[in-house]
Amino acid sequence: MDEHSLHQETPLTRMKREAGYHAAGMVEDGMVIGLGTGSTTYYAMEHLSALIDEGLRIQGVPTSFQTEMLARQLRIPLTTLDTYPELDLAIDGADQVDPSLRLIKGRGAALTREKCVAAAAQSLVIVVDASKCVDTLAAPVPLEVIPFALQPVILGVRALGGIPELRTGVRKDGPVITDNGNFILDCSFGTIGEPERLEGILTLMPGVLSCGLFCAFVEKSVIVVGRDEGCRELRL
């Protein structure tokens, strides 16, 4: 993500900005919050930076090196899960959201740290543009896989009827390497009829560090949807 390009306003970036700014407005003074990875989360961080300049006091736990570097540029004070294993709130994005508030995440290859932060947060605020809201989850499901187990996991995904594809780098030869030193498998299953069941099966595969299906956080999730006519909040 080139954060400077995000300032070139288009209808899509306007929806992302509105969602991100809305989510930032939900942060209260003194909170310790999770900071997700991705373009929509950038806008939340941008607005948080402005609120900090106005006197807001917060600390953030970044979910990736990219988010950490961006937070430092924006002068957002940072901390860690070691210091604060329980967070007040986390702001993150999603690749898809269904009506039950189940998510597919991981396009930015930060799914493991994002899931750790989501689990630690009392409230999970997901910022998306309207195109990410779907009737049924069907996007490829990212898996973070330790390199030693890559081929067995590929076989396991195929046995489930999935089509696994090793994510390769842009302007880099070879596979994408996560912040944890692992590979990403993007696994296509078509329409996912039972997301919780698939998440459980994939997560239990030896060598899989994390799965991009996020089904366990629906009760504490708030989906902020940026739309042409303004933001909408979705809750159960």
Image (tube, rainbow, N blue to C red):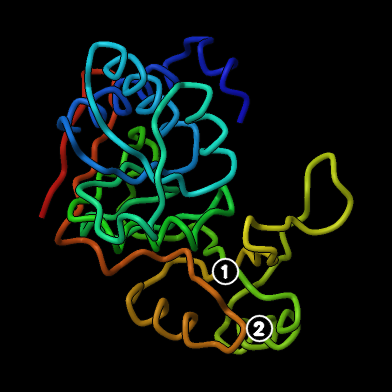
Residue lying farthest to the right in this orientation:
173
Along the viewing direction, whichever of 15 and 91 lies nearer the viewer? 91
Q: Provide residue 135's location: percent of width, then percent of height.
A: 30, 54
Say which quadrant the N terminus sits in.
top right
Seen in the picture, residue 31 relative to 20 is either above or below; the reply is below
Give the amino acid type for the residue marked by disc 2 in the picture.
Answer: Val
Q: Secondary structure at mark 2?
A: helix
Q: Provide residue 81's location: percent of width, then percent of height.
A: 38, 57
**Which residue is the site of mark 1?**
143
Residue 153: numbered disc: 2
Q: Provide residue 125's location: percent of width, then percent of height.
A: 25, 44
Quarter of image, res 188? bottom right
**Label 1 Cα crowd, 10 Å radius (few <14 / some 14-19 / many 20+):** many
Quarter of image, res 47? top left
The residue at 40%/62% (across/down) is 115
Q: Provide residue 63's location: percent of width, then percent of height.
A: 47, 49
